[in-house]
Image: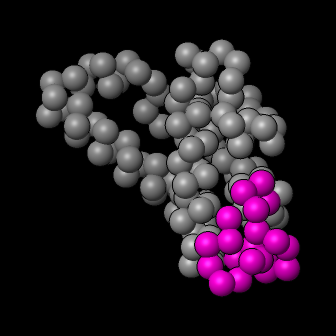
Amino acid sequence: MKNGQDPYCPFCTNVEQTVGHLFVSCPIASSFWSDFSKWYQSVSKKTLSLSENEIMYGVLTNWSSCSTLNHLILIGKYFLYCKSLNSAKFQFADFLSLVYDKIDIESNIASISNKQNIFLRSGPVL
């Protein structure tokens, strides 16, 4: 990815930054996905164990029941990427804040469009 002058991971600083490293194998990313899995299990009541491929490409089996999970995985990768741009330290609560802001925006859009009932049926409001 190497967006900056430094070719190294902005979180662990001694490993070359690649997409796979930033999103999966970096210790910061691993910790993030561990917290993500615990949080997702607590709100969805579904057991979750994400593989490296599922983090990178999404959950491809049972797509219709995993669209919310895949959306959250995308938001998680976006979050990690944004934090990497300025080497920012973060807490998992920062990610949750982003997720709840997005839910609030989508809820407002649904309300304005008179589609709140569709929004509420489309998945669990985390």
Q: Is residue 12 left or right of residue 57?
A: right
In this view, 123 is above or below 20? above
Overall secondary structure of the magenta section: loop
Pick whichever, 1 or 50, lies toward us. Answer: 1
- Identify the residue shown where x is 15% and y is 24%: 114
Residue 72 horizontal side relative to residue 31, left or right = left
- For residue 50, what is the image quadrant? top right
In this image, 66 relative to 96: left or right? Answer: right
Place of residue 42 in the rendered image (x, y in percent of width and height, measured from the top left): 63, 37
| Display colour scheme | one colour
Q: Residue furthest bottom?
A: 5
Find residue 74 and report its horizontal and vertical position in percent: 56, 44
| Image location (x, y in percent) of residue 44 | 59, 30
Task: Kindly indicate the quadrant of the structure image that contains residue 11.
Answer: bottom right
Residue 16 lies in the magenta-colored region: yes
| Quarter where residue 46 is shown | top right
Quadrant that contains the N terminus: bottom right
Task: Name the side, left or right, on which 124 lies relative to 114.
Answer: right
Q: Which is nearer the eye, 60 or 97?
A: 60
* Residue 78 on the magenta span: no
Per the rendered image, the range of residues in magenta is 1-21
Evaluate whether residue 88 shows in this view: no
Which residue is located at x 59 percent, y 33 percent? 69
> What residue sits 18% from the left and 32% below the top?
111
Residue at 66% across / 47% down in the picture? 36
Q: Is residue 117 visible?
A: yes
126 or 113, nearer to the observer: 113
Q: Is 19 rendered above or below residue 102?
A: below
Question: Where residue 56 appears, x then y in whole percent?
Answer: 71, 43
